[in-house]
């Protein structure tokens, strides 16, 4: 087996395909990497390969497959917080909110990171459990208030602040710092979304153009781009982007998908 044909190298190509290729290509590569990893225990942690397959399946809108792979990751490594969060993400998209909340709660018991705490808070809010949601959001704010932790999670904090209409200038500042460190697709996306939340729509438009320059197939990027286009009065483009986000993955994010549908209704035909 050549060096390029090992499970880690194929997994790396799958991750690259998620950003610069197609989700179909990424899914095929992830499946190849997973098969190799399962065939050779020396390859490393099988949970990693199951989670990669789960993430690509989720972005593709293949929710049952995403849940299966997430559960397989959890079987491979009991208590893995990333696997628990992935299970929760898929269950939420499939409409099993109680099970999703339970999975997220188990995840944050082990690893209370911003992204998972925010996702849990959002599900609790959608389930009408406002006090519990606010408690989880308060944990996010506590992380954001700690300079050392904030530096480690500035991208996730910026997205949380932008999503929840809090401290828009701080969101922009954190996203700028993250972008300076890592000028990747999702750094540009977080920066664009923070600028949009701060009402700086023209700058947000330029940033989201950079985020989408590689043609990344991801509903969250389409949603952000659609909302920015709508704010700039480009209604037809906004409708196309928001519909594309929902067509690929109707439940790509509990609150984001809801807001995308609301925006489409407001934009009309």
Image: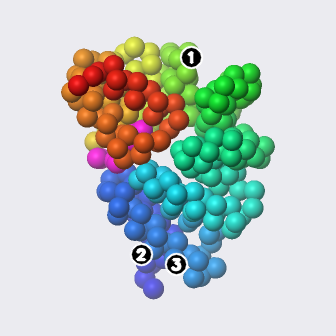
Distance from Cα at disc 2 to Cα at disc 1: 45 Å
Q: Is residue 1 magenta?
A: no
Work out which quarter of the rendered image holds the N terminus and state it: bottom left
Q: Earlier in the sequence, mark 1 or mark 3?
A: 3
Q: Which mark is residue 4?
A: 2
Secondary element at image label 3: helix
Instruction: State the residue position of label 1.
Output: 166
Q: Earlier in the sequence, mark 2 or mark 3?
A: 2
As drawn, the residue found furthest toward the right would be 109
Instruction: State the residue position of label 3.
Output: 36
Secondary element at image label 1: loop
At x 24% / y 17%, what residue is drawn?
233
- Give the mark count: 3
Distance from Cα at disc 1 to Cα at disc 3: 45 Å
* Mark 2 or mark 1, whichever is nearer to me: 1
Secondary element at image label 2: helix
At x 60% / y 58%, what residue is drawn?
70
The segment highlighted magenta reads 214-221
């Amino acid at each position: 087996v050549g060096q390029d044909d090992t499970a880690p190298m194929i997994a790396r190509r799958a991750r690259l395909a998620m950003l610069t290729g197609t989700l179909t290509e990424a899914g095929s590569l992830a499946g190849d990497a997973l098969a190799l990893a399962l065939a050779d225990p020396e390859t490393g942690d099988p949970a990693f390969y199951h989670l990669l397959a789960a993430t690509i399946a989720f972005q593709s809108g293949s929710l049952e497959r995403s849940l299966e792979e997430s559960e397989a990751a959890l079987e491979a490594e009991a208590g893995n917080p990333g696997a628990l969060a992935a299970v929760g993400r898929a269950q939420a998209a499939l409409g099993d909110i109680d099970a999703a909340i339970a999975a997220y709660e188990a995840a944050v018991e082990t690893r209370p990171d911003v992204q998972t705490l925010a996702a849990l808070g959002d599900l609790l809010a959608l389930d009408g459990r406002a006090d519990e949601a606010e408690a989880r959001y308060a944990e996010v704010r506590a992380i954001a208030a700690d300079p050392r932790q904030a530096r480690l999670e500035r991208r996730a904090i910026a997205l949380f602040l932008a999503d929840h209409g809090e401290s828009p200038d701080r969101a922009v500042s954190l996203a700028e710092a993250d972008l300076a460190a890592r000028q990747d697709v999702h750094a540009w996306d977080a920066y664009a979304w923070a600028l949009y939340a701060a009402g700086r729509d023209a700058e947000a438009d330029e940033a989201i153009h950079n985020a989408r320059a590689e043609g990344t197939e991801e509903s969250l990027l389409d949603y952000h781009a659609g909302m920015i286009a709508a704010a700039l009065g480009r209604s037809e483009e906004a409708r196309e982007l928001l519909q594309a986000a929902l067509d690929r993955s109707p439940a790509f994010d509990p609150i984001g998908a809801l807001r995308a549908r609301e925006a489409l209704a407001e934009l009309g035909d």
